[in-house]
């Protein structure tokens, strides 16, 4: 049924991955390394130079990484997230929030 593995399943031999898949995997790996460099981002042209630049940098990079992962996942199902109780619990918490978040935007 569900397992408690948190790491995605990757192929054993990189030579068995097609060239586009290995390129996507490498781009995602480089993006994750760039995400770890986020604390070094400082924007001098904003009011909050230590907060705003990091937020924009992180959101843009995460958006690109998720898009690359979705493409990689549809090309090779081995990169799909494993089913786990943690993921199920997270989705159970997030879906109602996404559904009811539009009600807060209505003007009175």
Image (spheres, rainbow, N blue to C red):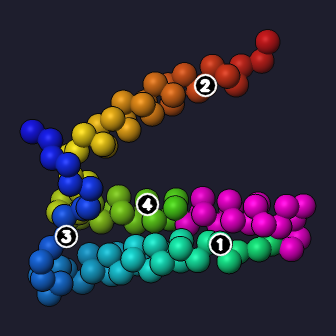
Residue 55 image position (x, y, % from top left): 68, 59
Q: Answer above or below: position of 79 versus 29.
A: above
Q: Residue furthest bottom?
A: 15
Point out which mark residue 39 bears.
Answer: 1
Of callouts 3 and 4, the N-terminal one:
3
Which residue is labeled 2 in the image? 102
Of callouts 1 and 3, the N-terminal one:
3
Which residue is labeled 4 in the image? 67
Which residue is labeled 3 in the image? 10
Whether tag 3 and tag 2 are in contact, CB under 8 A, the answer is no
Residue displayed at 51% across by 30% down: 98
Of callouts 1 and 4, the N-terminal one:
1
Residue displayed at 68% across by 61% down: 56
Q: Which residues are magenta?
A: 44-61
Residue displayed at 60% across by 63% down: 58
Q: Answer above or below: position of 23 versus 55.
A: below
SS at mark 3 in the image: loop
- Give left or right: position of 71 versus 66: left
Of callouts 2 and 4, the N-terminal one:
4
């Amino acid at each position: 049924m569900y397992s408690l593995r948190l790491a995605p399943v990757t192929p054993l031999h990189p030579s068995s991955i097609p060239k586009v898949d290995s390129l996507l995997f490498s781009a995602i790996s480089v993006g994750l390394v760039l995400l770890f460099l986020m604390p070094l981002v400082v924007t001098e042209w904003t009011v909050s130079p230590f907060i705003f630049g990091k937020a924009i940098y992180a959101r843009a990079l995460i958006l690109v990484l998720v898009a690359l992962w979705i493409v990689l996942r549809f090309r090779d199902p081995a990169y799909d997230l494993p089913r786990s109780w943690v993921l199920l619990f997270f989705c159970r918490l997030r879906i109602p929030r996404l559904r009811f978040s539009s009600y807060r935007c209505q003007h009175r």
